[in-house]
Image: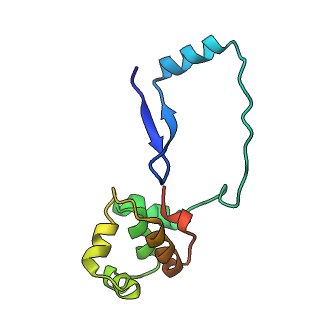
Amino acid sequence: MSKQYIYDEAGKPQFVVLPVAEYERLLSASDGEWETIPVEADEHDDETIPHDVAGIMIEQEVSLQAAWRIWRGLSQHDVAQQLGTTQSAISQLERIESKPQKRTRERLAKLYGCRPGQLIL
């Protein structure tokens, strides 16, 4: 069976993406008897990204971190100075496949005027 895992920030598997045929097979095998799982809401349930930031991300084909920086009118050099690092380090951080550490996201969020959760997809 083909499947894809979706991981949380800590690398722990949280979800599985299944082929539709497998999903439908599981549905039919369950006879509609699903277990109710309690959900605990928290303050981050409605985490959103501004439309303009998402637009920059799509139009310029950049990472979410880069889109926030561009939206705030900052250069990589500006961000590097504010964070006490190099422009090269910011360039690496803004790679599309980059997964910034929690502390880095917190520092960027403070600089960009957003919440750390708004810096991850």
Residue at 35% across, 88% down: 81
Q: Relative to the observer, which residue lies in front, 34 or 47?
A: 34
Image height check: is 15 above or below 2? below
Residue at 71% across, 23% down: 34
Q: Relative to the observer, which residue lies in front, 75 or 17?
A: 17
Image location of residue 86, percent across then percent down = 28, 81
Image location of residue 28, percent across then percent down = 62, 12
Image height check: is 72 above or below 43? below
Image location of residue 50, percent across then percent down = 56, 65
Residue at 34% across, 67% down: 94
Q: Quadrant of the N terminus?
A: top left
Image height check: is 66 above or below 11? below
Left or right position of 63 against 102: left
Question: Coloring scheme of the render?
Answer: rainbow
Image location of residue 105, percent across then percent down = 47, 69
Tell me which corner region of the image, top left, top right, bottom left or bottom right, holds residue 61: bottom left
